[in-house]
Amino acid sequence: MEIAQRAKSISPSLTLEITARAKKMKADGMRVVSFAAGEPDFNTPEYIIEAGHEALKKGLTKYTPAAGTVELRNAICLKLKNDNALDYGVTNIVVSNGAKHSLFNAFMAILNPGDEVIIPSPYWLSYPEIVKMAGGVPVFVHTKAENSFKITAEELEQAITEKTKAFILNNPNNPTGAVYTRSELNALGAVIEKHEVFVVSDEIYEKLTYERRHHSIAAYSDILKERTIVINGMSKTYSMTGWRIGYAAANEQIASAMSSMQSHSTSNSNSIAQYASAVALSDKFHGDAFLEDMRATFDARRALMMLRLHRLGLEYIEPKGAFYVMVSVKGFMGRSIEGQRIRSAYDFASLLLEQAQVAVIPCESFGADDYVRLSYAASEKDIERGLDAIGGFLAQLI
């Protein structure tokens, strides 16, 4: 007896061992500095927590419509209109168990076996695996460091074939921190309009931008909006990672298909988290204050991390959004420490954790073999201490 072929095709994450080892070292009492975090290190705002308590007291603990409560979907519609200049109705919105679940539903709704999905590289490591689970074929476009690893209109045009069904755009990007300008999005939009291609626009980090504003590609034109599935959620914006609320906005045919499939798999998202999310989106006074404080804090940490990386002589991609920095370790390939040779970014990360007690994420699983990802969802004290330790580690390489 064998497991399904679809399960066999899923690649394990190279990051899991590093993360597990770092956690064990901390549990054993070691002072590990972790730059591996994929979530804000802020607690969920108190007004949202209070809304969760209120939902419990009101007895809002029953099933909701599979696509989400009308109250939450209305709040999402208002958010999309005010923040992104996108007009949607309740029937265009599907609330799921986190943005990753929304992505899974989206690809299950649009892909047939063998359909190709264009994924700019570097990419969030779950994209190709979700595409494969939905029967699709990931097609990677290797972007250039000199373009901050952003796909260009020319690169997208060259990648589209008669088998292309969709294009993934992650803006702001994990792991690069890249943010597309309006003109860059317009150029991509013009290419997509010429072809029968869907866009899956992952905008989960939209509120965490620095120096430039986020724009949604769905706002390019009515034609493109009809073909775009906007993915977002509460996790990064409101530090609600554990509440598991994501959402998608799409044309009614796609949204209906996503809702129907969800109704037969997970059914509705957590009812209490839905109520709290509606309050989170609707209370602009408390929400905007929290968001600005978090964004400003991340911006200061971003500047500190870039300064320290520069002083160490490390090459990195300047992030304009999210809370990650991609650092090149290509120059350390072939070097050794205590007789152990570095042959990959994974080796670099593994030895850095072992020798300096600093956790970083190797980017092989993100499509960037010569890079590691550092998260600045960490205190300034930890950033200073961690970069000191990295400097000591580098000084020992021979």
Image (spheres, rainbow, N blue to C red):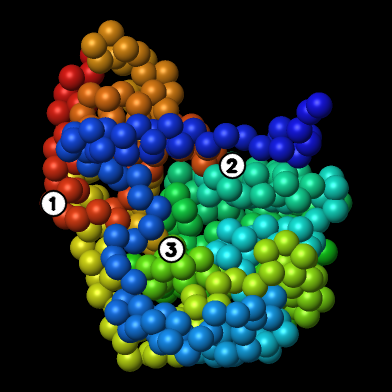
- Residue 214 position, x and y percent, is 46, 72
Q: Which mark is residue 241?
A: 3
Q: Which quadrant holds residue 184?
A: bottom right
- Residue 116 position, x and y percent, is 78, 48
Q: Which mark is residue 142?
A: 2
Q: Amino acid at mark 1?
A: Lys
Instruction: Name the residue at 58% across, 48% down.
Output: 126
- Mark 1–mark 2 distance (CA, rounded to whole Å): 35 Å
Q: Amino acid at mark 2?
A: His
Q: Nearer the viewer, mark 3 or mark 1?
A: 3
Q: Nearer the viewer, mark 3 or mark 2?
A: 3
Instruction: Name the residue at 30% across, 45% down.
Output: 35
Within-10-Å neighbours for mark 1: few <14, some 14–19, many 20+: few
- Mark 3–mark 1 distance (CA, rounded to whole Å): 24 Å
Tell me the quadrant of the picture where the C terminus can be found: top left
- Residue 337 position, x and y percent, is 25, 15
Name above or below for residue 253 compared with residue 128: below
- Mark 3–mark 2 distance (CA, rounded to whole Å): 30 Å
Residue labelled with disc 1: 381
Q: Amino acid at mark 3?
A: Thr
Q: Which quadrant holds residue 43?
A: bottom left
Name above or below for residue 173 compared with residue 341: below
Within-10-Å neighbours for mark 2: few <14, some 14–19, many 20+: some
Q: Nearer the viewer, residue 4 or 112?
A: 4
> Can I make out residue 80 in this image?
no
Q: Earlier in the sequence, mark 3 or mark 2?
A: 2
Q: Which mark is residue 86?
A: none
Helix, strand or loop status at disc 3: helix
Name above or below for residue 259 compared with residue 177: below
